[in-house]
Image (tube, grey):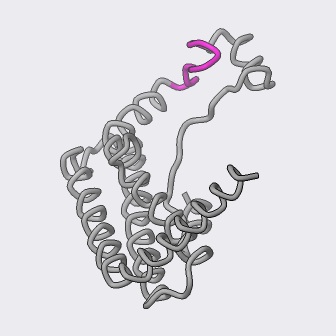
Amino acid sequence: MGFLRRITADGTVPVTFCRMLPYAGTPIEEGLAQEGRLRGRVENPDYDFLDPRIHSYFEALNRLVAHWTNGSDALLNQLNFAWHEYGVLRNLFPPLADLPSYERCLRTITRRSNEYLLTLVEDVANAFENDCWRVPSAVEVQAASQRFGAQLLAERNAFVLQNQETLLACLGAASRAQGVAAASHLEA
């Protein structure tokens, strides 16, 4: 957890994690197969943990964070999209009003959501270790995810609205240039 906290501390990347994937042809896949723990198929490999308590922990954590990490509307995907879009806006458009401020907003939302998620992972681990379930419910975690997502959407929409004329002008110019290039290619 300390490693994940360090590499995501600046808020430029959302936290994500999963269990190790035993890719076909790797020593890990071979070892799991020899131990009789490998399940699934080549395109969807799976395995059993050695300690059933780890499996229980993994399943409980996955249920809690499913809305956060899985699906097209998952907060993880929304944050990744926002950061990719920011990169396109920064690198392919003329300077946009308040782009540094928008970046700070993205960093803050990402940093806070990372902190929430990493704290949750630690809390669930502690609950398993101490056999004491004092962690948020899946509904509470989903609500937190939705709050971060709503804040992200509001900031993004405000930034795009503020820069709408510049963005549309650039896209229009690019579209016209592409049309001219296509017409030139057809004439040749």
Q: Nearer the viewer, residue 105 or 177?
A: 177
- x and y percentages locating residue 119 in the rendered image: 40, 60
| Horizontal arrangement in the rendering, residue 188 relative to residue 178 (left or right) | right
Find residue 57 and report its image quarter: top left
Count the marks. Answer: 0
Task: Please state the extent of the stretch shown in magenta in the rendering.
Answer: 39-51
Image quarter of the N terminus = bottom right
Find residue 87 and report its image quarter: bottom right
* Residue for point 29% across, 79% down: 158
Q: Nearer the viewer, residue 9 or 67?
A: 67
Is residue 49 inside the magenta stretch? yes
| Horizontal arrangement in the rendering, residue 96 relative to residue 150 (left or right) | right
* Residue for point 41% across, 46% down: 69
- x and y percentages locating residue 10 in the rendered image: 55, 76
- x and y percentages locating residue 59 in the rendered image: 39, 31
- x and y percentages locating residue 22 in the rendered image: 67, 26
| Horizontal arrangement in the rendering, residue 65 relative to residue 173 (left or right) | left
Find residue 31 and report its image quarter: top right
Is residue 98 inside the magenta stretch? no
Q: Nearer the viewer, residue 173 or 42?
A: 173
